[in-house]
Amino acid sequence: MMGKFDFQELASAFIVLFAVIDIIGSIPIILDLKQKGRSVNAIKATLIAAVLLVGFFYAGDMLLRLFQVDIASFAVAGAFVIFLLSLEMILDIEIFKNTGPIKEATLVPLVFPLLAGAGAFTTLLSLRAEYAPINILIALLLNMIWVYIVLKLTDRVERLLGKGGIYVIRKFFGIILLAISARLFTANITSLIEQFHQLD
């Protein structure tokens, strides 16, 4: 079931995913990779990230059932991950360290964990607890188009926004993510508490 199209749900899902994927905030990292001579393929990165995210969006439910975890529990766990991501952005600290062995920048760290990381995965499943799948998928597709445009125009975007502009945007979306994590937590913790009461 894809559910009913709803522009407000689409807009909300787009903003949440925009903040979590945070391609603008990743521009300094992408530029640093390019300066180190690590190539970044915009179309390849966008397509792989989209396939991973859509795949997890559909198979994630099955994985949760396999481990006997319900969507509300996962949404609460996702709220904690989004909370930590927001702290990274607001406080300029590194919580999620990338110590992988792969040296090709398109896959690591660009696709994973920057574009399709733990935050994006948990956010997608957390959104499923609230919105119709059709709205989330369109929001994800629009975000992937935006990611491709930014990757193609990284140097121009940095010149346009400046280091200060990127810094301010990162802080702004960090605060938005903090609010989203609080809302996700409160919305789903109540249903978990109700489930516990029903078990009693």
Image (tube, rainbow, N blue to C red):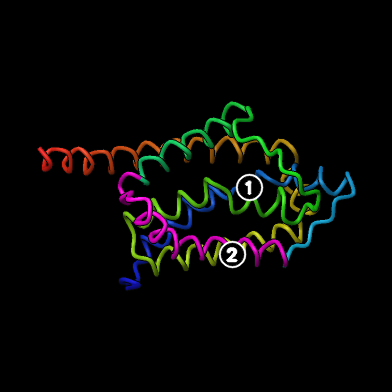
Q: Which residues are magenta?
A: 44-73
| Residue 12 in sight here | no
Q: Is residue 181 above or below residue 38?
A: above
Quarter assignment of residue 93 = top right
- Secondary structure beneath dot 1 equals helix
Amino acid on which disc 1 is placed: Pro
**Residue 107 rendering spot, x and y as whole percentages:** 72, 55
Q: Is residue 145 left or right of residue 12?
A: right
Mark 2: give few (<14), some (14-19) or many (20+) Cα within 10 Å: many
Quarter of image, res 66 = bottom left
Q: In front here: 158 or 29?
A: 29
Asked whether the residues under the numbered discs 1 and 2 touch, taking CB atoms below 8 Å apart as contact, a structural biologist would say no
Question: Disc 2 marks which residue?
Answer: 50
The residue that mark 1 highlights is: 113
Quarter of the image with the C terminus is top left
Q: Residue at x 63, y 28 (%)?
A: 92
x, y percent for residue 156? 79, 54
Q: Determine the CA span between mark 1 and mark 2.
A: 13 Å
Amino acid type for the residue under numbered disc 2:
Ala
On the image, the x and y values in percent for residue 100 come to: 71, 43
- SS at badge 2: helix
